[in-house]
Image: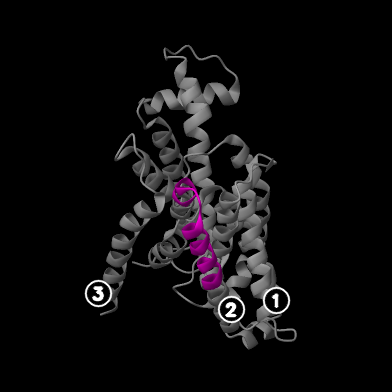
Amino acid sequence: MRSSGGVPVKIISLIIALFILLCSIVLSSGMGAVHIPPLKVISLLWQKITGWNIHIDYPESWNVILFNIRLPRVLLGTLVGMTLAIAGVVFQALFRNPLADPYLIGVSSGASFGATIAIYLVWKFSWGGFNAISIAAFFGALLTMFTIYGLSRIGKRTPVTILILAGVALGSLLTAGTTFLMFTASDAYQTIHTLGWLFGSLSSARWSEVTGILPYLGIGFLFLGIFSHRLNILQLDEHQAQALGINVEQTKLILIFVTTLATAAAVSVSGIIGFVGLIVPHIVRLIWGSDHRFLLPMSGLVGAAGLILADSLARTIFAPRELPIGIVTALIGAPFFLYLLRKQKRDIM
C-alpha cells in the first residue's frame, strides 16, 4: 500500500513513528537479566532529566544498570539504526539502484580493514572517548571513500556506474586484506574479536561513544535535510536536473561525503550491521511513498526502532550469551521485506 495522503497525513505518520521509537527506547531499557518496569524507567528518566525527586521505591542498582549500561546502548543503537537507514535512502536515490545500501562504495570494507589492523597490531590508544579500533575503522572508511571518489573522477564528472564499480573493486581488495589478517593472526582472540566486530555489536556502548558520534551525525543530517528536495529532482535524468538549476556534480559530491561521514561514524562504534540500510528504505517507500522530504525522517525513525528491537533480541533471546546483531537484522528484515515485495506484486497485478 502506498500512501497518497497529503502533508497532514505524513506529519501524523511521523508523530506515530516517533512515539513508537520512544516506546521502544523505554521498553528496551528495562529488558535484561534485571527487569525494570516501563513506568519505573520513565520515572527514573524524568527524575534524571528534570532533577525533581520523585518518591518511588526501587533498588539503587537500577540507577547504575539503567544509566551506565542500558541507556547508552539503546541510544547508540538509536543513532546507528537511524544513520544506516537514512544513508540507505540517499545511496538508493543517488545511484538509482534499489540494491544500494550504506556499504555499497566500500565504507564497510574500509572500516573493517581499519578495525582489523587495530586489533591485529593491538593498538591501545584512545581519543575523544573512542578506542583505537573505532578510530581506525572511522578513518579506514573515510580514506576508502576518498580513494574511490578520486579513482572515479573523469574530468569534472563522476559517473555513478564507475563510482559503484570502483567501490566494489576496492571493497573486494580490502575484504581480502581483512581476511588475510584474520588467517595470519598469531592469537585466536584477534580472529574472534575481528569476527565479532564484523557481525556488529553494541555490547561495549558507552556515553562517550554516544556523544562522540553526535557531531558527525548532526552535520550529516543537517545537510541531508537541506538537500532532501534535490534528491527528488535527481530522480529525473541528470540533464533535466541540470536544466532545473541543480548543480548535479556538486550535489552528488556533498551528499556522498556527508552520508559517508555519518555512516563511518556509526560503523566505527557498532561494527558492520547489515540489512538496515537496504530494507528500511524499501519498507518506508512501499508504504508511504518516495518523497525524500518525508522518506528521510521516516526511514530514520523506523531504522532506529528496528535496530533497538534487533539489539534487544540479540542480548536477551539466548541470555546470558549474545547473538551478533547482523544475524538478527537478517532474520527479521529479510522475510518481512519479501512479504512486502510479494504484497506489492499482488497490488500491481
Whole-percent x, y for residue 58 in the image: 42, 15
| Residue range corresponding to the magenta coloring | 171-192
Q: Which mark is residue 158?
A: none
Q: Which mark is residue 150?
A: 1
* Left-right relation of 27 to 224: left
Residue bearing mark 3: 346
Name the residue type under label 1.
Gly
| Secondary structure, magenta segment, majority class | helix
| Element assignment for label 1 | helix
Q: Given the current orientation, which residue lies at the most extreme front position?
A: 186
Q: Secondary structure at mark 3?
A: helix
Mark 2–mark 1 Cα distance, whole angstroms, equals 10 Å
- As measured in the structure, the alpha-carbon distance from the residue carrying label 3 to the one carrying label 2 is 37 Å
**Closer to the camera, 247 or 103?**
103
The mark that comes first in sequence, 3 or 2, is: 2
Mark 2 and mark 1 lie on one chain; the one further toward the N terminus is: 1
Does residue 224 appear anywhere in the picture? no
Tag in front: 3 or 2? 2
Residue 293 is situated, as x and y percent measured from the top left of the image, at 56, 63
Q: Please tell me in which quadrant of the rendered image residue 236 appears.
A: bottom right
Query: Between residues 156 and 341, which one lies in front from this camera angle?
Result: 156
The disc placed on residue 166 is: 2
Location of residue 312 with respect to 84 vertically, above or below: above
Total numbered labels? 3
Looking at the image, do the residues carrying marks 1 and 3 touch, with CB atoms under 8 Å apart?
no
